[in-house]
Amino acid sequence: MKKSDVLIIGSGVAALQLSILLRHDKNVRILTKSHIKNANSYLAQGGIAAAIGIQDDPSKHFADTFEAGRFHNNEDTVREIVNEAPKLIGDLAKQGNIFDKDQLGNLQLGLEGAHSEKRIVHSGGDATGKNVIEYLISKLPENSKVEENVFVYELIMDHQQKRCIGAKAKTEDGTIRYFYGDYVILATGGCGQLYPYTSNAPTVTGDGIAMAYLAGAEIADMEFIQFHPTLLYINGETKGLISEAVRGEGATLVTEDGTPIMEGVHPLKDLAPRHIVSQTIFNYIEKGHEVFLDIRSINDFETRFPSVTAICQNNKVNLSEGRIPVVPGSHFLMGGIKTDVMGRTSINGLFAIGEAACTGLHGANRLASNSLLEGLYQGKRLSQWINSQQIKNLIPDFPELVPFLPEKSVFLPDVQVLKEQMMKRVGIVRSKELLEEQQNWLEQLDVSELTEFDAYSTEDLTAIFMYVNATLITGSALTRTESRGGHFRSDFPDENDENWLRKIIIQKHKGEVAINHEYVETALAN
């Protein structure tokens, strides 16, 4: 039996931070469906937000987070994380010396959309995620074992103890393996691949959220999906993320004839909250325009943005012309598995951290560069709690390996069809008519009723999880009859605090799906 003290599924910043901060007498196992670096955290071009500037204060960071999240945030969660941010950055800066500094040796601070102060620390310009992940990987202790190319597809529940005790997984040759742990942590990221245009890694298909839902965990705020305004757009395809920091350094959004599109739309213009910028670009593209980032005002662009430069050059974009073609695409999920600030879910023994979790930090729309911050914080907070626990749970006598089973197929439309339907009906702009059309289509497929996953291929399992997430998103988006943050309803274009300052919680229990509401504990609500 492969039993660990701590079983971590996923390999992003939250997972690695947790692993290196756990006591070294803990037996830790990290399972990742691909390579350890093939995660959204590694792709993150933006930085990490922390109020460490002379003119800055965590109270300002708090206010900016709430404003971007449209007051749907959990007040205690936001305060706790932004107050801890300076120390998290300070500790990393001392230990790893990985952040960019000015000529005086102070951390360089950048400005990004919806921030009132320069508070974004970067590493290698726009390679923050890559450098932070490589640093954390270098610090993995001997008690942490990493297993790559292991596809986890089902949580193992002990119904007598009423707790999660492990997970089933498939290796590349189709062998089914059982992994057990006293603490099972989902750090599997969001579900950006549900859309045809996305900044997300190919592996980010919502596996952890779907598994948690199918096991009976509470899922929250799935309607709130952030569409990043600026993905490189070549010949109808997205080719990578153009960091928000580019606009922070002065780039502007223009049409093919040079008309600025953010003038008069929002006081912050090109640095307005992401949902406003994305919707504006989307509107212009729907009217037949092309939209570009005009970067001519940025000196030494190739030096300051090496990752963006490499993406553009690889796709034959001539940066000397000063324009980068862009389109909005799915970027970040504010919802996910409902947890408290340290990652505890509604199922005993099961935890979720990072983008897979919905802690309430981001509210209805994530403030730029708060994602890596949340992952670092949750990894540290959960490690402290686990390190303080002494009790080991008894694991029943379950198998470790299952003989190879003949595979059966699930008859679902190709995932590319799903992606196109999600963008058309549950994308940036939504309506009752389109959402009901999508919901009816998904209900006919009845994916959430599928059971006995052992015989399905990893490709079919991935499709099943994507369809489960699509159902959760569509149902939540249809239920919320207002526009807030990343969720925009053309038939309900305004916020409705009186009726809708609350979370939508979806849970599957004894074969039945329940949708409940939970009021958000914020200063606005009080």
Image (cartoon, rainbow, N blue to C red):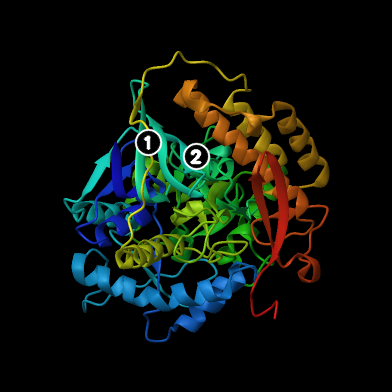
Circles 1, 2 touching at the beta carbon (< 8 Å): yes
Taking the view exactly as shown, the residue that stands out farthest to the top is 406
What kind of element bears circle 2? Answer: helix
Of the numbered discs 1 and 2, the one sitting upstream in the chain is 1
**7 to 353, vertically: above or below:** above
**496 to 179, vertically: above or below:** below
Front in this rendered view, residue 122 or 103 = 122
Taking the view exactly as shown, the residue that stands out farthest to the bottom is 55
Q: Position of residue 232 (x, y in %)?
A: 49, 44
Residue 280 sits in which quadrant? bottom right
**In the shown orientation, is residue 347 left or right of residue 181?**
right
- Check disc 1: other Cα within 10 Å, few if <14, some if 14-19, many if 20+: many
Screen quadrant of the C terminus: bottom right
Screen quadrant of the N terminus: top left
Quick check: can you spot residue 189? no
Q: Could you give the CA–CA distance between mark 1 and mark 2, rounded to whole angstroms?
A: 10 Å
* Three-letter amino acid code at the position of disc 1: Lys
For label 2, the residue is 207
* Three-letter amino acid code at the position of disc 2: Asp
**In the shown orientation, is residue 380 left or right of residue 141?**
right
Q: Position of residue 395 (x, y in %)?
A: 37, 44
What kind of element bears circle 1? Answer: loop
Front in this rendered view, residue 276 or 92 = 92
Q: Position of residue 521 (x, y in %)?
A: 64, 74
Quick check: can you spot residue 451? yes
For label 1, the residue is 33
Residue for point 41% across, 51% down: 185
**151 to 361, vertically: above or below:** above
